[in-house]
Image (cartoon, rainbow, N blue to C red):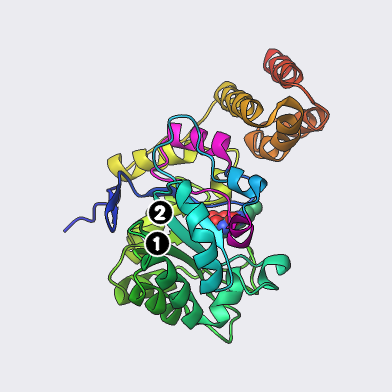
Amino acid sequence: MEQILYHPVKISSLVVPGNLFLAPLAGFTDPAFRQICLEHGASFTYSEMVSAEALARNSGKTINLMKRAPGETLLGIQIFLPDRSTAHRALPVLLKAKPSLIDINCGCPVPKVVKTGSGSALMRDPEKIGEIVKAITDNTDIPVTVKIRSGWDSGSINYLEAAEYAVKAGAALITMHPRTRTQGYSGFADWSMLKKLKNTIDVPVIGSGNLFIPEDAQRMLKETGIDGVMFARGAIGNPFIFEHTKELLTTGSCTGTVTVHTRFSAALTHLKRCIDDKGESAACREMRKHMGSYTKGIKGGAALRNKVVHASTYDEYEEIFSEFLRSL
Ligand SMILES: Cc1cc2nc3c(=O)[nH]c(=O)nc-3n(C[C@H](O)[C@H](O)[C@H](O)COP(=O)(O)O)c2cc1C
């Protein structure tokens, strides 16, 4: 029977309309970026990772990370934390944000996070993952999901064990980035582990790792039989990847071309929303990291990026883009 590659995903009581997820990306997946991705076909998005400890302490800056974009109905809030007691303390504040689901970060490799016993440090103590999930599922009906790596290092590949603890404690979905903590974001992401995971657990599995073009997603779904894919670096500066992938999965082909004009137009819409949210000066500064990606692959893009790094107002960005388009 032919495999249907694009379809809804049922996460406990929550039905997500499609299976193309935007990853949680610290420093990137703010409301403005999520909204652009949703408009271009993302089925579901997550907040940046949020410190549960800071939530427990009622930090306004951290609470702000859970803010929704205008009209954003579904939102996964991802938290990082070391243990169940932090979960207990953070939960009342977290629930006020009414997340569609709560995701537990078991993958972050950053030393500042790992040192606290959070993120990928949890892969060294998978029983704790179960304890954290249970601390939340015992106290709310909101679906709890877990994002894991394949293990801490190549000598301790334990993703099946970690996922089993999580599911036993009530996790409704597992996302896996099949690299170890030691690998960080480079090297081989072993998709065969996604297939093994899918064949081992009874909840949906979402795959992450090296998804940069629609054909990557198609191949991951076909090769592994998992339920959905999660775009991360591949979506930065390229929200079009969602609609292109949906087209590929539903029709079998996709031209995948985006004109320079369309790229600039999306970048300016993105910037405008970021300004509404954070003010012009902060937004223009923050957009620089996105602009490198929006202009990637454009002939003359390097010169354009050199100009953009000096832009500090919306009008300056707009003028730089207009000038570039006039020169084509
Ligand atoms: C800049 C950056 C920020 C990230 N932030 C998070 C995060 O907050 N939470 C998380 O679970 N993963 C985070 N990740 C990991 C991604 O969600 C994803 O699993 C990883 O990049 C692999 O996918 P890719 O190879 O397609 O980029 C981050 C990755 C990058 C590059």
Q: How packed is label 1: few (under 14 Cα within 10 Å), some, or many (20 or more)? A: many
Image-quadrant location for residue 236: top right
- Magenta extent: 30-57
Secondary structure beneath disc 2?
A: strand
Quarter of the image containing the C terminus?
top right
Residue 297 location (% of width, % of height): 64, 37
Label annotation for residue 37: none
Question: Earlier along the polypeptide chain: callout 1 or callout 2?
Answer: 2
Image point 62% across, 25% down: which residue?
276
**Marks 1 and 2, Cα distance to the nearest angstrom?**
6 Å
Residue 307 location (% of width, % of height): 81, 27
Image point 65% across, 39% down: which residue?
293
Secondary structure beneath disc 1?
A: strand
Image-quadrant location for residue 170: bottom left
Up the image or down, 97 lies above or below 197; here it is above
Residue 237 location (% of width, % of height): 60, 38
Label annotation for residue 144: 1
Quick check: which quadrant has ligand 1?
Answer: bottom right
